[in-house]
Amino acid sequence: MSANQPVLALIAEGAEYALLASEDSTTFVLRFKTDQLAAHLAGEDAARFQADYKTIKDQFPTWQPDRMLAQLWDQGGYSWLATQDG
């Protein structure tokens, strides 16, 4: 791994989606496992994602990870930032 790439930890996962984040929350990777796509979020995109993720978690605390992450992927528009994963 490159010295400038942050270490990412899994913070939410379901059957279809997974979310990883750096310890300082400046980098996120939102994966759509079914289609092997991932949105790599840093800078302003990461800041916006962090706010959107918190909003969804606060508004719908009982949602399972797949439902929450699918909402962000589709309605949040993060699918537009996705590239082939792996």
Image: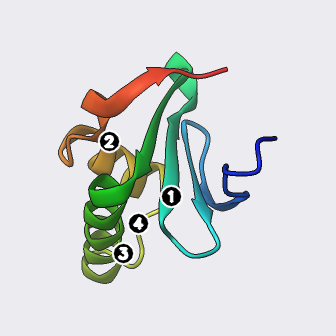
Spatial CA span between label 2 and label 3 = 14 Å
As helix, strand or loop, the secondary structure at mark 2 comes to: helix
As helix, strand or loop, the secondary structure at mark 1 comes to: strand
Give the residue type that dot 4 points to.
Trp
Picture residue at 42% right of the left edge, 75% below the top? 62
The image's colouring method is: rainbow
Spatial CA span between label 3 and label 1 = 18 Å
Give the residue type that dot 2 points to.
Trp
Q: Are marks 3 and 1 in contact (CB under 8 Å)?
A: no
Spatial CA span between label 3 and label 4 = 8 Å
- The residue labelled by disc 2 is 73
- How crowded pointer 2 is (Cα within 10 Å; few <14, some 14-19, many 20+) is rated as many
Q: Nearer the viewer, mark 1 or mark 2?
A: 1
Q: Are marks 2 and 4 in contact (CB under 8 Å)?
A: no
Q: Are marks 4 and 1 in contact (CB under 8 Å)?
A: no
Picture residue at 73% right of the left edge, 58% below the top? 7
Q: Nearer the viewer, mark 3 or mark 1?
A: 1
Q: Quadrant of the N terminus?
A: top right
- The residue labelled by disc 1 is 27
Q: Nearer the viewer, mark 2 or mark 4?
A: 2
- The residue labelled by disc 4 is 63
